[in-house]
Structure formats: structure tokens, C-alpha cells
């Protein structure tokens, strides 16, 4: 049996005793709380019969309403592919409780990644230069400055109902593996921070050079100086896109832990291919490589994101995480980013809120 993909039944058996633990936030030291959820609530494997939703939940509205009774937070991944629509955000507000939190992934064009032209809003498509209209995919750098500005404005307008209702958590900016540590890259991050204004952002890197011997200290210092939350990752190692699981808090407002799983055979494949080949979500207690802890505690909020590239049983480990943080045997070694998160939760971090989200994703 693949220890990173044990199958649905073993995961269900493991999570069974603590299945209800994720339904409500867990209060931690210093007045903080832990929230647990998944990335997306509509992935095909998640909506498959018998996996998560009851048989009667068949519409988007019914599924989100049910999801919000099982988890207090969710990550919206669809906004990476298509800019969010204001009306859709209004519906999300209407369908979730007042204390529910939605974290939103930044659109591809906002982080230097390509977007399909056909998925852009009509007004932006029609305003494209003729040579770009002919392309299947374009990059933000290809756009005239006014259209690039419009992408950001459209994104912010699309999530404004969430922000206004107090539902918006953070905007997740995931930079691709061709974004290396450089003055240009750091300026891009600061530009994103300026454009988002009072909306909280987080930053995730996909190239190991951000944390090699030469750049690690500078990377953390840059993020800390500008109070930009860093996304701590736990993911397959040995690739150029691999970033080591350095547990660092770089903002007094927020820290992010994201767990991508350990499927090395899937790591650098495109998301559609990964979805086709990935198995079920692995056991949430599996051990990882020892990592060093850098950084102190978040004063207000710690966001732990549990992300795995196997989704079929995504809700099982997500619901198990709070219970595991309570029940971890005394004396057990703290290794891997998941164990760092569990240990930090028990200590409290002095954080106002901890969110952990388990899911398949990029």
C-alpha cells in the first residue's frame, strides 16, 4: 500500500473517531481559534456519491449550505481560472453563516501565470490587442497597462461582497516556478500588496531558490519587513519547484500552512493530469522530513492550510486534524510541517485564528 495514498477506507477508519472535530472552530491559548476546511466544495471527486455530500444535496446552493455546516472555512480555487463575479460572491454570502470565512486564490494573470483568453470577461477580451485575441493563452506581462489594471480591478470588484460582509479571509498569490528571487519579483509582490489595499494577501513560492542558502534569510526578511504572510508548504522534495517546509511567521496578522501531499509522480504535472491520476487523500498523520522552524508567533491569526493532491476523501483528514492536534501522544517527535502546525496549535501561537484547509490543488 502506498503510504501517501492508503485509500479511502483506511483514511475513513483513521478519521472516524474525530470526524466531528472540524465542524466548529477550536479555541486555543491567547483567545485564538482553529478553523479547518477544504479547498473547493465542488470538485468532481468531492461531490461523488457517498464521499461527502448527502444524496439530497445536488445543487451548488445546497452543497455550499451543507458544507458550511461541516466546516467554518473554505478556499475558492476557481478564481485562479476565471475572475470572480460580484453576483456569485453575493450568493456565497447569502448561503453561508455570518462567521464563515472564504479564502480566495488570485487569478493566474495576477501572479505571472497564463490564462485562457476565452475565460476572461467579455469586456476585457474585446479590449485585447488583435494579436492577443488570436492567442489561446496570454500572460499578464503581455497586456497593455490599462488592461492589466482592469484585471486587478475586476478581481477586487468580484470579491467585494465577501469583504463587505466580513466573509473574506485572504487572497492567495501563488507564484509559478519561473518566478525566481530577484528585485523584479519582490517589486511584483509589493505591487500586489499595494493593489489589494486592505485585503489580506499571502504569498506562496514554487521555486526552491527562494529558500536556498543564499536567499532564505533575505526572503524571510523581505516578507517580514513588509508584513506579508508567507505560505509554509509541505510538498514533494527534489524538484526545482520544490520549496522546503520552513515554518516561518512573517506577518503579525496571518501565517499560512499548506500541505500539498507527497506524490512525487504527480507533483510537476498539470492540474488536470494530476486529477486524473491522483488517488485518495493520504492519512493526515503520516510523517514527513524533519524541518527547521524559523520565525516567531503570529499575534492575531495563523492560517494553516492542509492541501493534498489526492481529493476523493478530502473531508476525512480535514475533519481529523483538530482531533489529532488534541490527541497526539506525548513524547512523539515533531517532524514535518503538519506536526509543526499541530504543535503550534497546542501552544496557541498567540494567534487570533488558525485555519487549516485540506484539498487537492495547484
Image: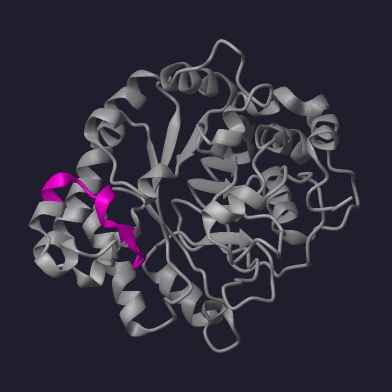
Residue 147 lies left or right of residue 111; in this view the side is: left
- List x then y, in percent, for residue 267: 63, 63
11 in relation to 69, above or below: below
| Nearer to us in this view, 107 or 246 | 107
94 in relation to 240, above or below: above
Residue 256 lies left or right of residue 228; in this view the side is: right
Residue 66 lies left or right of residue 311; in this view the side is: left
- Give me the residue at 70% from left, 22% from top: 20
The stretch drawn in magenta includes residue 61: no
- Give me the residue at 89% from left, 44% from top: 329
Q: What is the span of residues highlighted in magenta in the rendered image?
A: 111-124
- Give me the residue at 60% from left, 87% from top: 213
Residue 32 appearing in the image: no
- List x then y, in percent, for residue 108: 35, 58
- List x then y, in percent, for residue 293: 67, 67
- List x then y, in percent, for residue 280: 72, 42
Amino acid at each position: 500500500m502506498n503510504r501517501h495514498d492508503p485509500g479511502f477506507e483506511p483514511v475513513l477508519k483513521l478519521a472516524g473517531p474525530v470526524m466531528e472535530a472540524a465542524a466548529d472552530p477550536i479555541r486555543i491559548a491567547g483567545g485564538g481559534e482553529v478553523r479547518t476546511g477544504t479547498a473547493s466544495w465542488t470538485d468532481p471527486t468531492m461531490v461523488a456519491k457517498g464521499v461527502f455530500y448527502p444524496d439530497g444535496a445536488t445543487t451548488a446552493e445546497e452543497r455550499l449550505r451543507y458544507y458550511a455546516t461541516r466546516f467554518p472555512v473554505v478556499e475558492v480555487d476557481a478564481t485562479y481560472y476565471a475572475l470572480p463575479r460580484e453576483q456569485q460572491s453575493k450568493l456565497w454570502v447569502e448561503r453561508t453563516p455570518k462567521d464563515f470565512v472564504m479564502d480566495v486564490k488570485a487569478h493566474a494573470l495576477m501572479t505571472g501565470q497564463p490564462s485562457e483568453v476565452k475565460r476572461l470577461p467579455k469586456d476585457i477580451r474585446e479590449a485585447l490587442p488583435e494579436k492577443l485575441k488570436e492567442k489561446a493563452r496570454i500572460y499578464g506581462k503581455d497586456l497593455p497597462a490599462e488592461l492589466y489594471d482592469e484585471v486587478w480591478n475586476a478581481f477586487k470588484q468580484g470579491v467585494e461582497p465577501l469583504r463587505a460582509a466580513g466573509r473574506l479571509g485572504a487572497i492567495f498569490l501563488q507564484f509559478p516556478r519561473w518566478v525566481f528571487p530577484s528585485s523584479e519579483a519582490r517589486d511584483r509582490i509589493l505591487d500586489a500588496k499595494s493593489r489589494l489595499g486592505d485585503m489580506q494577501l499571502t504569498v506562496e513560492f514554487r521555486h526552491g531558490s527562494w529558500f536556498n542558502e543564499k536567499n532564505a534569510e533575505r526572503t524571510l526578511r523581505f516578507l517580514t519587513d513588509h508584513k506579508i504572510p508567507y505560505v509554509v508548504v509541505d510538498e514533494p522534495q527534489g524538484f526545482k519547484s520544490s520549496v522546503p517546509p520552513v515554518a516561518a511567521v512573517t506577518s503579525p496578522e496571518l501565517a499560512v500552512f499548506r500541505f500539498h501531499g507527497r506524490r512525487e509522480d504527480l507533483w510537476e504535472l498539470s492540474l488536470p493530469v494530476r486529477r486524473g491520476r491522483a488517488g485518495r487523500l493520504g492519512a493526515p498523520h503520516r510523517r514527513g522530513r524533519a524541518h527547521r522552524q524559523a520565525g516567531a508567533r503570529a499575534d492575531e491569526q495563523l492560517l494553516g492550510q492542509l492541501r493534498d493532491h489526492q481529493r476523493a476523501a478530502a473531508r476525512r483528514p480535514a475533519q481529523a486534524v483538530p482531533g489529532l492536534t488534541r490527541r497526539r501522544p506525548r513524547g512523539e517527535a515533531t517532524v514535518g510541517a503538519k506536526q509543526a502546525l499541530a504543535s503550534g496549535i497546542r501552544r496557541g501561537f498567540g494567534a487570533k485564528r488558525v485555519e487549516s484547509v485540506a484539498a487537492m490543488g495547484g
